[in-house]
Amino acid sequence: MTNIKRVSAVVIIIDDEIITLYKPEYDWYELPGGKIQDGETETEAAMREAREEIGCDVTLEGKVGVYDIVTPTGPKRISLYSARLNGEPYPAEPDTFPRLFRMPIDQVADYNVPDHIFEICTQYILKRHKKSA
């Protein structure tokens, strides 16, 4: 049986754009996040990974959900939290993520993203249209 790596990540949406990091190794955009370390909670990991990858602290606002995905390195279970920035983000790990990109949510289908990011953006768009109707 394959072990599923537990990771925690944040989704940050500002002015209908989602903060993503470009990962050339996989030629895709992903959310700030990473492996949950031993003795660390999901929320602690989400905040630590955001600080490490986008160079600023975040405030978690709530749990978005849990997503099982398969990446080139194997299966992962992602605990995803909505968050807001406490500073100006930048690619703090440029060797891994050379570019931070504010991806327009309504254009997510035009970019190479993991399925869970596409799903999150689609749900956000649907909620936004419900509120404006």
Image (cartoon, rainbow, N blue to C red):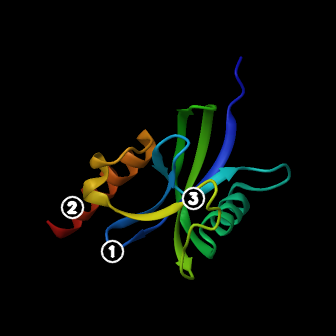
Task: Report, in whole angstroms, how far the alpha carbon at label 2 lies from the one at label 1.
Answer: 17 Å
Residue identified by numbered label 2: 130
Query: Marks 3 and 2: which is nearer the front?
Result: 3
Q: In the figure, is residue 95 to the left or right of 31?
A: right
Q: Residues within 10 Å of mark 3 (few under 14, many from 20)?
A: many
The x and y percentages for residue 61 are: 54, 69
Q: 84 above or below 82? A: below
Q: In the figure, is residue 113 to the left or right of 41?
A: left
Dot 2 or dot 1: first in sequence order is 1
Using the rendered view, name the quadrant where residue 57 is placed.
Answer: bottom right
Q: In the figure, is residue 72 to the left or right of 101?
A: right
Dot 3 or dot 1: first in sequence order is 1
Residue identified by numbered label 3: 32
For the N terminus, give its image quadrant. top right
Residues at badges 3 and 2 in contact (C-beta under 8 Å)? no
Residues at badges 3 and 1 in contact (C-beta under 8 Å)? no
Taking the spot 69% from the left edge, 37% from the top edge, the residue there is 5
- Mark 1 lies on a secondary structure that is loop
Task: Report, in whole angstroms, how far the alpha carbon at label 3 lies from the one at label 1.
Answer: 18 Å
Taking the spot 54% from the left edge, 74% from the top edge, the residue there is 89
Taking the spot 31% from the left edge, 68% from the top edge, the residue there is 16
- Mark 3 lies on a secondary structure that is loop
Taking the spot 35% from the left edge, 66% from the top edge, the residue there is 17
The x and y percentages for residue 32 are: 57, 58
Residue identified by numbered label 1: 15
Q: Amino acid at mark 2?
A: Lys
Dot 3 or dot 2: first in sequence order is 3
Q: Residues within 10 Å of mark 1 (few under 14, many from 20)?
A: few
- Mark 2 lies on a secondary structure that is helix
